[in-house]
Amino acid sequence: MNVALIGSQGQLGSDLASCLNDVTALTRDQLDITDENSVRNCLANIDADIVINAAAYNFVDKAEDEPDLAYRANALGPWCLAKLCAEEDKTLVHVSSDYVFAGDRQRSKPYDETDRPTPTSAYAISKLAGEQYVQAYCPKHFVVRTCGLYGHAALRGRGKGNFVETMLRLGSERDQLSIVDDQRCTPTATADLAKGIVDLLKSNEFGLYHLTNDGDMTWFEFAAEIFRAAGIDVELTPITTEQFGAQADRPRYSVLSNNRAQQLGISLPHWKDALGEYLAERNG
Ligand SMILES: NC(=O)c1ccc[n+]([C@@H]2O[C@H](COP(=O)([O-])OP(=O)(O)OC[C@H]3O[C@@H](n4cnc5c(N)ncnc54)[C@H](OP(=O)(O)O)[C@@H]3O)[C@@H](O)[C@H]2O)c1
C-alpha cells in the first residue's frame, strides 16, 4: 500500500511514519489541511491509494475562543479530504476523539460505535463534524476514535505536548500536585495506536472503530502510575473537574469499547504496559 500521511510530525503521525513502508510523510508546510488548494495540489502529485489524516487542531480549551479555527482544521479539512479521496477511489483514514461523548459520572459502560455522540465543547463538535463528513462523503473510510494520546514526538516539541510529559516536567519542579480524579478514560500510546491502524488498513473492513489501550483510569490514577514507574516522589491530591476549572468541558466518562476492532483480531496492550514501554524507550 502507498500512503500519503498528513500531520506526519505530530505524535501519532511520527509513529505511523515509522510503521509504514511506502509512505509519503507530509508536513504542514507541504499540505495545509485548512486550505483546499493546498490539499488538492499536494495530493495530486503523490501516487497514493491510501490517505491517512493524523493532523488536527488539538487545543481543546483554546477552541472555545476560536471555534472557527478548530472547525476549519477538524471538520472542513476532513470534508475536503473525503471528497478528494472519493473522487479518486482512495481509502481515507481519519482520527477522531473520545470527546464526542459527554459521559456523565454515573456511567460505567464503555461506549461502542453505535452509541449516540453528545459533544459538549467546540473542539468535540469540530471532531464529530469531521468524522461525519468523512463517513458521508468517502465510502472507503476508516474513522478511528481514540483517547488521550501520548507519543515521543511531543518530547521533540511537536504538537501540543502530552499528559505524561507534563507530569514528568511538573514532578521535577514541584513537591505537590492536584490532579483531576473524576474523568475516567483510557489514555493511549501512539506507538500502539499506529500499529493498530496499520492492522485495520490490512483488513479492508471499512467503517467506524474505537481504538485505545486496554483498561481505564482517571488522570489522578494515571499520574500516580507515571510517578511510581518513573521513581519520582510527589504528593498527589485528587480534585474535581470543577476545581481544576479548565475552559472547555470534558467528559466525566469516555472509556471506549474496542470490541469491534478486537473482532478483527486487533487489540492494544493494557495502559500500564503501554506507559511502561513509553517510559523505558524515553529513558533508553
Ligand atoms: N492528543 C490527544 O490527546 C488526542 C486524543 C484523542 C484524539 N486525538 C486525535 O488524534 C489525532 C492525532 O493527534 P496527535 O496527538 O498525534 O496530534 P499532534 O501531536 O498535536 O499533531 C498534530 C499534527 O497536525 C499538524 N497540523 C496542525 N494543523 C495543521 C494544518 N492546518 N495542516 C496540516 N497539518 C496540521 C501539526 O503540525 P505542526 O507540528 O506543524 O503544528 C502536527 O504535526 C488527531 O486527529 C487528534 O484530534 C488526539
Image: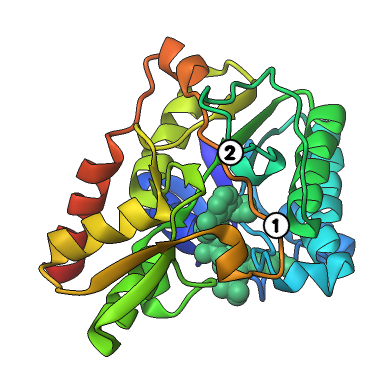
Identify the residue at horizontal 44%, vertical 10% (top origin). Answer: 263
Q: Amino acid at mark 1?
A: Asp
Please state the horizontal and vertical placement of residue 244, each as a whole percent of the image: 56, 69
Q: Amino acid at mark 2?
A: Arg
Q: Nearer the viewer, residue 199 or 179?
A: 179
Please state the horizontal and vertical placement of residue 214, each as a whole percent of the image: 35, 32
SS type, badge 1: loop
Residue beneath disc 1:
249
Residue beneath disc 2:
105
Q: Give the tally of numbered discs.
A: 2
Identify the residue at horizontal 51%, vertical 48% (top origin). Answer: 183
- In space, the residues marked 1 and 2 are separated at their CA atoms by 13 Å
Identify the residue at horizontal 87%, vertical 60% (top origin). Answer: 36
Can the viewer see residue 19 in this picture? yes
Residue 136 picture quarter:
top right
Q: Nearer the viewer, residue 54 or 47?
A: 54
Q: Nearer the viewer, residue 257 or 216?
A: 216
SS type, badge 2: loop
The residue furthest top is 263
Residue 167 picture quarter:
bottom left
